[in-house]
Structure formats: C-alpha cells, structure tokens
Amino acid sequence: MIKSTLKYSILCGIFLIGLFFISINFGSNPLLDMRHFIFDLGVFFLFIYFSGKEFKDYRNGGFFHFWQGISIGFIVIIPAVLIFSIVFYAVFQANPELIEAYKDGARAMLVDKKDLYLERFTEDQYQQQLAAVDDETTARLLFSTFWKKIIAGFLITPVVAIILRKKPK
C-alpha cells in the first residue's frame, strides 16, 4: 500500500508546487487568497482518490475499508506537504524579496478591508495586526502554510474514504 501511494504523494507535492507558482504568475497571492485553500482541497481529493482507487481495484480485490482510505490519505498528504514545504522554504530563502512582497500584500489587504476588520475588532487590535505583518518571517509563514495544507488534507481524507469504501459481503 505504501509504495504505490508514495508515487501519488510525490506527484501531489509537485502539483502543489506548480499550482503555487502558477497562482503567483496569474497575479494571485496563494498565501493570502482563500480561494487557494479550495484548490488545495481539490488537489488533495484527486490524488487521494486515485491512489485509493488504484489500491482498491488492483491490490485489494475491489474491497476498501474506511481505515484504509484514512491511511492512504495520510500517506499521500504528509509527504506531499513536506515536499511543498521544502521547496517553499528554499525559494523564499533564495529570494528574500518574496517575503517582502507577501508583507506588502498582507498590508494592502488589511488596509482595503479596514472597515470590515473594525466592525469586529478595535482600532488597537487593527494596529497590532498591521504591526504583526512587519514581524512575519519565512519560518513563520512556512509553518502557517504547512498547517493550512495539512488541515486541508485531513478535511478531505474522510470524504474520499467514504466515497471509495466497499466492504465484502
């Protein structure tokens, strides 16, 4: 199960990297844009589904238990996100202007949505949030992105496991 699933995991990691850079080239900041979270869910769904489908059809006689789906999902997600994170860190270390571009985008987003922010929070909290943007580091950004992707994968894994499960009669 692990060997066949790891090829999907590696492909998923490469696909996440490609999607990240394609998003940047189209002018979207995948670190700030919540639509990218939806894309991550879709990518994880596809790779977990096809990995589970291959295991079910070719290695397990057409049967698939929920726990197998969860296991396959974790085997796909964790290495894929690790691959993405390593490349993310290397790129951000090699290009320090990327972290500055992120900070500029985050500041611009906070300024654009100031009215919405102030409806729920105080002016002091808003100013603290603006100041926190300046303190952002590559490591913090990596940590945040890593956990967002892990959570996205963990959210979609049970859905795929339910779709694919088939018990023997």
Image: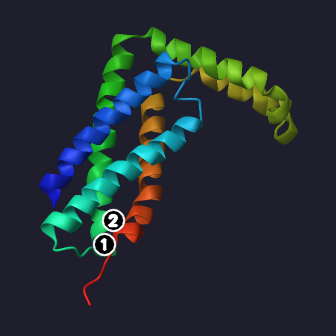
Q: Position of residue 21 (x, y in %)?
A: 41, 22
Tell me the residue at 63%/22% (across/down).
106
Q: Is residue 110 left or right of residue 147?
A: right
**Circle 2 crowding by C-alpha within 10 Å: few under 14, some 14–19, many from 20:** many
Dot 2: element: helix
User: Where does label 2 land, which residue?
Assistant: 70
Which residue is located at x 62 percent, y 18 percent? Answer: 105
- Name the residue nearer the viewer: 30 or 103: 30
- Report the side of 127 relative to 32 (left or right): right
Q: Where does residue 32 sit, x and y in percent of width and height?
A: 58, 29
Where does residue 99 sit, x and y in percent of width and height?
A: 49, 16
- The reply to whether discs 1 and 2 touch (Cβ–Cβ < 8 Å) is yes
Q: Residue at x 77, y 29 (%)?
A: 126
> Which residue type does callout 1 highlight?
Trp
Vertical arrangement, residue 166 with respect to residue 100, above or below: below
Residue in the foreground of this view, choosing between 59 and 109? 59
Residue under pointer 1? 67
Q: Quadrant of the C terminus?
A: bottom left
Element type at mark 1: helix
Question: Could you tell me which residue is drawn at 52 percent across and 41 percent down?
Answer: 37
Task: For the N terminus, give its image quadrant.
Answer: bottom left
